[in-house]
Image (cartoon, helix red, strand yellow):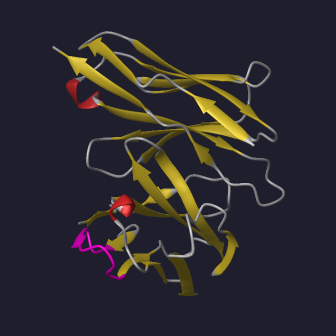
Amino acid sequence: GQNIDQPTEMTATEGAIVQINCTYQTSGFNGLFWYQQHAGEAPTFLSYNVLDGLEEKGRFSSFLSRSKGYSYLLLKELQMKDSASYLCAVAPRSGGYQKVTFGIGTKLQVIP
Amino acid sequence: DAGVIQSPRHEVTEMGQEVTLRCKPISGHDYLFWYRQTMMRGLELLIYFNNNVPIDDSGMPEDRFSAKMPNASFSTLKIQPSEPRDSAVYFCASSVGRVNEQFFGPGTRLTVL
């Protein structure tokens, strides 16, 4: 089975940096997704980490440590439009029929 | 491409009525997923299809829920009879490959009174 844990809510200030953590326990692991979901909208893809280390995409970066079962999403130069929920999701090994499992999501509020 | 299309966007019905949700995946995608999202439980996978064949329906809550995919461009999720606890947002998503990026539709907000 899979167990995913992330904080329920976070608040950060416009222009600042925020780190959203995700820990997971899984019987089979291929990689970890991060999705962004604005209120009332569908989740949209942000990143997919398969290898250990940090991957940067503009203001957003995602980190993975496979040995520690740990990932984080780093948002720099926060903007008001970054207020959203951020979902981490564990992807199983490519073989077999295991499904991608989503965490409950972290609701981020950016304040002026 | 128009992306994943879902209908209706909103559905309000009374307990005991049948509800049918519809989804058109992105052309060329071979996987289709049905999710339910609530505040308490987050995003839960109900069922997924590969090349129109149901692969894992272990997330379907009970026999009142059923899903079909008669062809590569259309899927339905049916609830019969509906109950107030079924109230949620239902998302359809599609992808190329089981573990690749999923593209979500806009969702159907279901309210059962």
Residue B111, by quadrant, is bottom left
Classify residue A77 as left or right of residue A112.
Answer: right
Q: Which region shows up in magenta?
A: B7-18
Q: Residue at x 42, y 41 (%)?
A: B40
Q: Residue at x 67, y 29 (%)?
A: A24
Classify residue B82 as left or right of residue B54.
Answer: left
Up/down of A70 relative to A103, above or below? above
Q: Position of residue A97 (x, y in %)?
A: 77, 60
Instruction: Name the one closer to the observer, B29 or B31.
Output: B31
Q: Position of residue B28 (x, y in %)?
A: 56, 75
Q: Residue at x 79, y 48 (%)?
A: A93
Residue A103, by quadrant, is top right
Q: Position of residue B9 (x, y in %)?
A: 25, 68
Classify residue B11 as left or right of residue A58.
Answer: left
Instruction: Name the one closer to the observer, B90 or A34.
Output: B90
Instruction: Name the one closer to the observer, B31 or B54.
Output: B54
Q: Residue at x 15, y 14 (%)?
A: A112
